[in-house]
Image (cartoon, rainbow, N blue to C red):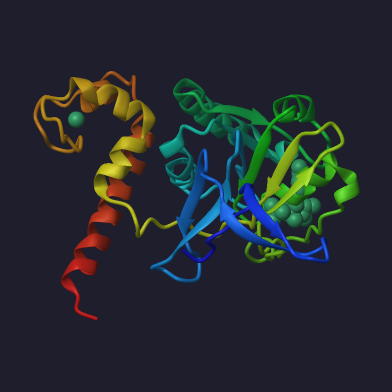
């Protein structure tokens, strides 16, 4: 673990004689947490946040272009604790009809599984009513790839925070890193938001193939109908997940992302286990 204590942790402190300083004696049990492979140290894990009520994932269709599979990778971090996720597509002001069609396509997929999608524009201040309503009385983790406008959105919600935003580079369409660690802010109405560093990539060195299968929510629900208890929904006979893909009850896009992820985890684990360091 690169950080034994995370944003959102509840701790017990022993105060020193001056009654100003204190020492953390204990981290209380976590109700939940969001964990990822450390972006810098492959073999370490990093806790993004603990004890959260929900996560808001900010994405864009373009500028920067939505990375194929990114949403599903993110959901792998929140699903182990059933943390509710709302997906906000920012920069709605620059979407063409084609972009809007992509949005509609993704919204249909994710709404159906239980991750509600919304369109928002931080620049035009559209879509904030829904966002503000979701935050009331909750602890919310804000996350997203770098450059999607997360800081701009948080600044609109809480202008007094004045988070640094940055100009997008013309070449890559990606912003520079500004947030380097997660931080919790209390809003005037009592809502708490956690801003976390912009994500570049998400890898899952620490997961097993079964973890992926268990955390694709609708696959897991359908898997009670699979013939084999440990069905990975690939080529096994009488697979209920594949049957639902045939009838389009389960999205083909999710399935392709799932296959890609299990392949990645399998390759990784194979090399880890067969390589002498
Ligand atoms: P972060 O890395 O997610 O925190 O992104 P920033 O908030 O720093 O924003 C990155 C760039 O996107 C900046 O140039 C913002 O002005 C721009 N941006 C943010 N929100 C919007 C939006 O709703 N529409 C458009 N067109 N640009 C936006
Ligand atoms: Zn199956």
Residue beneath the point at 60% across and 42% down: 61
Going by the picture, which residue comes out furthest to the front? Answer: 17
Q: Is residue 175 above or below residue 229?
A: below
Measured as percent of width and height from the top left, residue 266 is found at 23, 55
Residue beneath the point at 51% across and 40% down: 32
Total labels: the figure holds 0
Q: Is residue 46 above or below residue 227?
A: below
Q: Which quadrant of the figure has residue 20?
A: bottom right
Q: Give the camera-side residue of 124 and 5.
A: 5
Q: Is residue 35 left or right of residue 87?
A: left
Q: Which quadrant of the figure has residue 37?
A: bottom left
Q: Give the camera-side residue of 239 and 66.
A: 239
Q: Is residue 245 left or right of residue 202?
A: left
Q: Is residue 125 above or below residue 209?
A: above
Q: Give the camera-side residue of 156 and 60.
A: 156
Residue beneath the point at 60% across and 39% down: 52
Measured as percent of width and height from the top left, residue 214 is found at 31, 36
Q: Is residue 12 above or below residue 166?
A: above
């Amino acid at each position: 673990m690169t950080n034994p204590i995370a944003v959102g942790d509840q701790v017990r402190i022993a105060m020193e004689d001056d009654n100003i300083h204190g020492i953390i004696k204990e981290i209380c049990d976590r109700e939940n947490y969001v964990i990822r492979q450390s972006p810098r140290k492959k073999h370490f894990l990093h806790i993004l946040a603990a004890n959260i009520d929900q996560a808001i994932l900010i994405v864009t269709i373009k500028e920067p272009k939505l990375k194929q599979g990114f949403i599903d990778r993110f959901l792998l971090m929140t699903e182990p604790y059933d943390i509710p996720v709302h997906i906000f597509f920012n920069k709605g002001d620059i979407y063409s009809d084609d972009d809007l069609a992509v949005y509609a396509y993704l919204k249909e997929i994710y709404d159906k599984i239980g991750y509600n999608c919304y369109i928002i524009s931080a620049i035009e201040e559209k879509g904030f009513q829904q966002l503000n309503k979701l935050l009331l009385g909750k602890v919310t983790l804000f996350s997203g790839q770098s450059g999607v406008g997360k800081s701009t959105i948080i600044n609109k919600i809480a202008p007094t925070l004045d988070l640094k935003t940055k100009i997008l580079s013309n070449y890559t369409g990606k912003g520079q890193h500004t947030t380097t660690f997660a931080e919790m802010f209390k809003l005037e109405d009592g809502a708490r938001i956690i801003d976390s560093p912009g994500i570049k990539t998400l890898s899952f060195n620490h997961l097993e193939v079964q973890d992926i299968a268990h955390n694709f929510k609708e696959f897991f629900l359908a898997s009670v109908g699979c013939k084999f208890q440990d069905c990975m929904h690939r080529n096994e006979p009488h697979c209920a997940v594949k049957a639902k893909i045939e009838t389009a009850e389960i999205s083909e896009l999710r399935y392709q992302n799932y296959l890609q992820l299990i392949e990645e985890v399998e390759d990784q684990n194979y090399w880890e286990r067969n390589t002498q360091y």
